[in-house]
Amino acid sequence: MKILRLYIKLIDGLNEYIGIFVSWLTTLMVLVVFYDTVMRYAFKKGNVAIQEFEWHLFAVVFLIGAAYALKNGAHVRVDIIFTRLSARTKAWIDFLGSIFFLIPFALIVIYSTQNFIANSWAVREVSPDPGGLPGRYVLKAMIPIGFVLLILQGTSEMFKNFLVAVGIDEGGPE
């Protein structure tokens, strides 16, 4: 059990740190969108690179922040029945959900995007739009990074739920 608790502590700490960093990217994204909106509507000056930068930031926030959202229970959950269950039953559901859905899905995404990302890196893909951003291959590299973080956090959540499900720890998913 010490190894499980150590893994949980390390991964939760890692994703907490990354999540706080990503939250600052969200602030940057808001400022960039504000600047772009003012420039386009007040001064009639659009900029393709700024618009692409907005969705690049969004993609990084979404992909890299997903594990942080999972850690903090900010993911989407249908609570019609779930809220009425005991902590142990909720833990069993989340434990099994991690094993049979979350982790396999993340592994499939990582596996199925390998060629997509490798091809992008091979040609050093850039934006096809005039005035667009270079380095699109770097953005695409965020896909496996985000899903690896999700697997790590999903495993941490799975271990936490296991400890609750078998009665070692109290509590469980909210």
Image: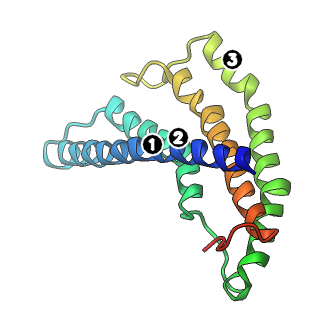
User: In the rendered image, which residue does mark 3 sit on?
Assistant: 119
Position of residue 138 in the picture relative to residue 45 (left or right) = right
Q: Quadrant of residue 167?
A: bottom right
Position of residue 74 in the picture relative to residue 112 (left or right) = left
Q: Nearer the viewer, residue 25 or 42?
A: 25
Q: Quadrant of residue 74?
A: bottom right
Quadrant in which the C terminus appears:
bottom right
- Helix, strand or loop at disc 1? helix
Q: Specify the farthest residue to the left.
A: 43
Query: Residue 126 appears at what percent x and percent y?
Result: 50, 19
Question: Label 1 is placed on what type of residue?
Answer: Tyr
Question: Label for residue 14?
Answer: 2
Residue at x 62% of width, y 40% of height: 149
Q: Nearer the viewer, residue 108 or 127?
A: 108
Q: Quadrant of residue 32?
A: top left
Question: Label for residue 109?
Answer: none
CA–CA distance in space, label 3 to label 1: 31 Å
Mark 3 or 1: in front is 1
